[in-house]
Image (cartoon, rainbow, N blue to C red):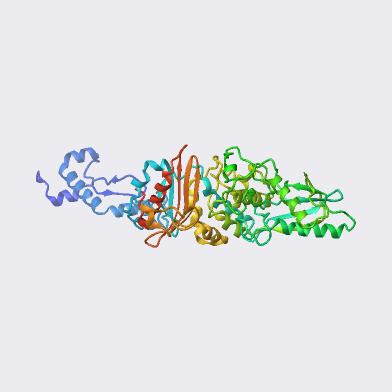
Amino acid sequence: MASSSASAAELAATAPTTVLQADQTPAVDAPAQSGERRGLGAWVREHPRAVLTTALVALFALLGTGAVWAGIAVGSAQAAPVPVVSETPTPQPDPRPLPAAVAEPSRLRTCSIQELAQDSSLDRLHVSIVNVETGELLFERRALDPVRTGSVLKVITAAAALSVLGPDYRMSTRVVAGSQPGSVVLVGGGDATLSRLPSGQESIYRGAPKLSDLAAQTVAAHAAANPDNPGITQLVLDATYWNPSDNWHDTWNRDRIPAGFQAPATALMVDGDRADPRAQTSARSTDPIERAGREFAQALANAGNPAGVPSISRGSAVGGSVLGEVRSQPVSTLIAQMLPNSDNTLGEMLARVTSKQMGLDGSTASLTQAITGALNVYGVDTSDLTIKDGSGLATDNAVPARYMAQLFAVINSGDRNLDIITDALPVAGQSGTLSGRFTGAASVARGAITAKTGWLRSAYSLSGIIRADDGTRLAFAFYSVKDGISERAKTAQDILAAAAFTCGDNLSNN
């Protein structure tokens, strides 16, 4: 009789085996039959320990051979397609991105002029200071605001003239034969330096052409062309190189005429329309054309005109033959005469002639287009500039301080003949309009600053180059703007510039 308990061997022998087929769910082999056919459920009920043992064995095999199961699944004909893996994996974003290049640490500058820049004497200060060698902006306040410049604008006029006219250009004054017998036409070409002084005497514009030379040429040429004519009986004055009535800007102060600082900007005049040709500051007239005509009529008589002093009228030349011509000093010389003593009339002449030579009409209205167009060759953005004259006297001129500082950085290079400007500028405590400045606390910078000054009743300005104590070159622009500004602003600007001289490249923007 069989024992009621089964051995482990018996259990193993009688346990069903599990067969896994690739395309079927697991199947259980039927147990050996003894007698009648028995159901699976009955067998499980009769052998619970065998079922448990078999399940444990199967679980161990499954955990230990997972890769085999995966291999069988991959090899199956009905399995999902094997994904293709790229040889170059898709890069994942670095959670800590690094810059392409590590920037050098900024230099810590410690020399401050902030307290000086807040001096109430400077009123509303606009300032920009640039390291010329590196182009770095070292100190700025309100530097992007376009504001009035005063005579600092003459530097812009000079740079524009050098760009368009070039250093060797000379302005011409001619006499041509008139349309009536015995008439000649004196044609102005924008040369305000033409002098009425006789040969051997110099006006404020040394080397200027002489009316006496032009008159001698004219009398001789007219006599040769008209041997039977009694001489020149009529002198016609032609100042139409630009509109002769467009000669005074609305914001200029009329009292500058008798004070000797400015004349109406006409294309025909002599000695800058001065009452005294030898004096820088000398009363002017309200009609430079009339003065020029009167002086030339007398010069014709002095040159031997058989008819003596001719009558005078105004008109324009109509293409007659040239009887005489004189030319100004070159633009390089005119700039050297304009900048040191801030000659307003030369500033107007250079600006108007620049406009004409650019194909414009020489008018006040043309100057923003003409001057900014001429300045574009220097590579500094001119889009914020408004130019109403060539002298800087107009209060609606508008130039940011940063523009002037950057332009002076270009001027410092001396390229494109810009060294002509540098050589002509006043030097602190030594020459021109800076000869009496930079005293007291500012005297440390005497001889080391080359700059253009500016003054209006509502602004003081100073802009140029500082050769700093540490050897650095700084380009700078200072504007102090206020209606009724005090002269104390000049001294405060000198002190501020001297402080920048002391700081050099250690100048802090704080």
Tell me how many marks there are.
0
Residue at screen point 58% across, 44% down = 387
The residue at the point 37 percent across, 47 percent down is 23
Residue 84 in picture, x, y percent from top left: 42, 54
The picture places residue 165, in percent across and down from the top left corner, at 64, 56
Q: Name the foreground residue: 237 vs 103.
A: 237
Say above or below: 214 vs 289.
below
User: In this view of the protein, can residue 469 be seen by the observer?
Assistant: yes
Residue drawn 57% across the image and 47% down it:
391
- 501 left or right of 173? left
**In this rendering, position of residue 376 left or right of residue 77:** right
User: Which corner quadrant holds the N terminus?
Assistant: top left
- Residue 479: x and y, percent? 46, 45
Q: Nearer the viewer, residue 228 or 159?
A: 228
Residue most toward the right? 228
Whether residue 34 is situated above or below residue 473 in the rendered picture:
above
Is residue 102 in view from this perspective?
no
Residue plotted at (15% across, 44% down): 49
Position of 28 with respect to 167 (left or right) is left
Nearer to us in this view, 109 or 493: 493
Closer to the camera in the image, 11 or 277: 277
In x, y percent, where is residue 239? 72, 47
